[in-house]
Structure formats: C-alpha cells, structure tokens
Amino acid sequence: MEDNRIGRRTVLRTAGALAAATAVTGCGTLMGSGGSRSSSGGGGEKKIVVSNSGGAYNDALTKAIYEPFAKETGITVTTVNYQSAQIIAQVRQGRPQVDLMDNTLLIFQKMARLDCLEAVDHDRLKSLKGAGIAEHQLPEHAVGKNVWASLMAYRTDSLQRAPKSWADFWNTHSFAGPRSLQSAEADYPELEFALLADGVPLDKLYPLDLDRAFASMSRIRGEVKKFWNTGALPAVLLGRKEVVMTSLWSGRADELIKQGVPVAYQWNGARRLTNGWGIPKGADNTEAAYKLIDFSLRPEVQAAFARLFPQGPVVPAATKLLSDDVLATLPTSPQNLKTGFDTDVAWWDKNLEAVTKRWREWADA
C-alpha cells in the first residue's frame, strides 16, 4: 500500500524536469535558512521532517512543493521514507520521528482509529477557504492533497476494438486473451471492478456485496494469467504482450505509450484514492506542518505537482491552470471525474482483514 504507489517510480513527463531536485530517494534535505528544530510546536521552527514513499514521487514533491516552500518560508524540509507501521510504533513510544506524513487516506483512516494522528484544525489552513475540496478528502485527521487511480489498460494491437467498461474486461468472448488483476497481496483486491462488471452502478458499490463480487471474480478467474502483487508488474505483463488487458495504477500506461508500446487505457470505472497529509500524534513541529500543508494546497502549487507527476489536484481551480494533454492523464480532470468513483476508505478500513482472509481462501480453492 505504501511502496511505489501509483507508479511512484514513474518516469516523469520531461526527462530533465527534476534534474535540480536535491532530495535523495528515501532521505533528503532541502536547504532553507537553517536553525534548530523546536520541540514546542511553536512558531519558531526552521526545520520539518516529512515522510513520503520516496523515488520519483519524492522528486516531484521536492521540485513542486518542498523547494519553493523552503525558499518562501526559510523552513528546511527533510524527507524520510517510513512505513506507517514504523510511525505508529514511534507514536506509541511517545517519540514520533516525523512532523508530517504523506500517505493515503486509507492509511490515515487506520491511524486515526488507532489514535495515532492529531486532529486537523482546518481553520488554520487559509488555502482551504473557498477551495472547493471534496468533503471526503477532508476527514477529521487528514487533508487530501493529490489523487491517483486504478484503471483498465489494454493492447491496441491485440484487440479488434477497444474495451469501454469492466463488463468488456469480463467479456472473454468478444475480448479474448489473458488478463491480469490486482491481488489482495498488493493492498486490497479490485472487488469494485468485479461488481461493476456484474452490473452494479458506480453510486451503488458500497457497502460491497462480497458474495456477488467473489462470484464475479470466479467467472473471470480462468482468464487471469496473473493476479499482480507489485505496482510495476501489470505494466511489465502488458508491455511484454503476456496479457491483452490489465488493471494498473494511473501513470503506468503513459510510460508504455511514451516508449512506443501499442497501449491505451480507459478511465470509465476507474477507482480513485487520495493521498494526503497527516500529523503524527505528539509531533514536534505542528506549526511548520500546518504551513507546509497550507502551501501545498495553493492552486498554482497543486498544478505544478500535476505537471511533474500524474496525480490529480484536489483543488478544482488547479485544473484550470493545466493544459489539455496533462488533464487527459489525471483522475481529477473535469472529464475523468465523471466516469470513476472514490474509494470508500472507511469501508475498506473496517473490512480489509476479513476481505484479505476470504481472498486467500478463494485463491487457494
């Protein structure tokens, strides 16, 4: 769930766009005005430690957010790559090593349930006022920042016509050839796609009907060559023509297309999930954390990040600053928002353990 999220090792749109980024994958420091880290959470902080997943994702954050933030405020941004389990352990020991986390709202749902996150005072974020951010992206203990999606991609040289829906993906007669879908071993299985294929409307997916979803999965199972368990694998299978269709994280198909591989993708029925900010309970530098969150929600900053990394802004005004070719790759463009759905993170947090257990039993049967 936290490694390589949405193609975080993605080759970015412009080959030299991030040459100036100073952060090292998994650990880096951006130069601000220096100074020592405050332990009081007051207003004199000159350093903030941020955890994210590293790689190209960190590079894009560095260029679009961390560097201009440090230049404007004089606050040094240091990045580390901690799994949420590590930070949960640190919080429980009373010694969180980071001031701010960048992770999915699903992870933050879990951490809030475990009482490991500070409640967010949204009134302290000036950029939120009138920004039009969706309510589900502003839970009590987190703030949404950027959106990625899982969607359908296919080989244009292997199919006589383009699949338009998950029902087409499940239609092995008209769209013959091996497929790939996500395993429960790579976060959580794509039961929503199975339900959409079975005729469930986008707005009626939750709570998921598990019996119906697994029955639908059983119908496609014989054509699934691989239930993938890492974010890179479906693009590899598609690129090698080992499958004709697959689910994959948005941005991966664009990489293949740029390489000249005859691949296209379909936004219809895409499953969206939001990455955001969370403040670990007991973090030292809450004042600097709020400043960085606020900065990241400015429309121009949101747009700058979207130009470097294929994840959509949560601030609608940011999309007006983006070109049509960039918007076509983003799950939150006005057009693509109409055809996908947002993951119900509360449902998944409550049911993930039971679903994973059932998936393993189903997979072994």
Image: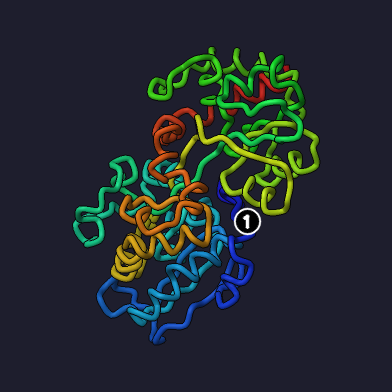
Q: Is residue 242 left or right of residue 64?
A: right
Q: Is residue 292 left or right of residue 156?
A: left
Q: Which residue lies at the image location 25% right of the left edge and 76% below the top edge?
A: 43
Q: Nearer the viewer, residue 275 or 269?
A: 269
Q: Which residue lies at the image location 48% right of the left edge and 78% below the top edge?
A: 30
Q: Quadrant of residue 364?
A: top right
Q: Is residue 80 above or below residue 200?
A: below
On the question of residue 88 being in view, the answer is no
Q: Which residue lies at the image location 59% right of the left edge and 17% below the top edge?
A: 214
Classify the position of the N terminus by image quarter: top right
Q: Which residue lies at the image location 44% right of the left edge and 34% below the top edge?
A: 343
Q: Nearer the viewer, residue 121 or 17?
A: 17
Q: Is residue 168 above or below residue 87?
A: above
Circle 1: residue type: Thr
Q: Tell me residue 51's x, y (percent).
A: 49, 62
On the question of residue 54 being in view, the answer is yes
Which color scheme did the rendering employ for the protein? Answer: rainbow
Classify the position of the C terminus by image quarter: top right
Q: Tell me residue 330's x, y (percent).
A: 48, 47
Q: Tell me residue 313's x, y (percent).
A: 40, 52
Residue at mark 1: 10
Q: Nearer the viewer, residue 104 or 156?
A: 156
